[in-house]
Structures are given as structure tokens and as C-alpha cells.
Image (cartoon, rainbow, N blue to C red):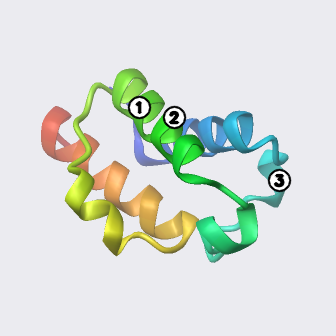
Amino acid sequence: MLNKEKIIIEIKEIISRISRIDVSELEENIVIRNELGVDSLMAMEIIATCEKQLEIHIDEGKLFEIETIGDFINMVVKLYEQKHGS
């Protein structure tokens, strides 16, 4: 079981690897679509990788609520804690 900090690091590493943006530049207030240039294919790859590595399921309907990296991290952490216990 991962703690919250490790989950955040894991998520940022996934986003960094797929978007080709250094982890140090991934501030939580960055708007994913506008500032990172993440297209829908990259977004789906990020989601699929998070689901696989963290053993969670991300409801695609919830993705419309996501604007920033912080929003995505909070959603994934919450899903992880619900599935694996906090």
C-alpha cells in the first residue's frame, strides 16, 4: 500500500513520461489541456497507466471535472484510498 506522497510521485512520473515534461515543472495548478499540451490520446495513456500501476478504475465521466494536475492527483489519490484503504 502506497502513502499519499508516493501516489503523487507515481502520478507525476506517469504524466512526465507521457507528456515529455520534466517532473519538476509539473505544478499542481497547471491546466492539463492548455498548459501541458496533452491531447486526448496522451490523456487516455496517462489514465490507462495510472489504472494499471495503481490498480484502480477511473470513471471516464469524472474526467470532465478535471482541469488541473492537482484535480487529477486528488481524484486518483481518492480512488486509490477507497480501493486499498487509507
Which residue is depicted at the point 34% across and 31% down? 51
Which residue is depicted at the point 39% across and 62% down? 74
Which residue is depicted at the point 33% across and 73% down? 65
Q: Which mark is residue 45?
A: 2
Q: Which mark is residue 80?
A: none
Asked if the residue under mark 2 is in contact with the one under mark 3, i.e. CB atoms within 8 Å, the reply is no
Quickly name the residue at label 3: 24
Q: Secondary structure at mark 3?
A: helix
Three-letter amino acid code at the position of disc 3: Ser
Q: Position of residue 7 (x, y in %)?
A: 47, 40
3D distance between C-alphas at marks 3 and 1: 23 Å
69, above or below 3, in the image? below
Q: Position of residue 18 (x, y in %)?
A: 68, 36
Q: Secondary structure at mark 1?
A: helix
Q: Choose top left, top right, bottom left or bottom right for residue 27.
A: bottom right
Q: Secondary structure at mark 2?
A: helix
Q: Which mark is residue 48?
A: 1
13, 84: nearer the viewer: 13
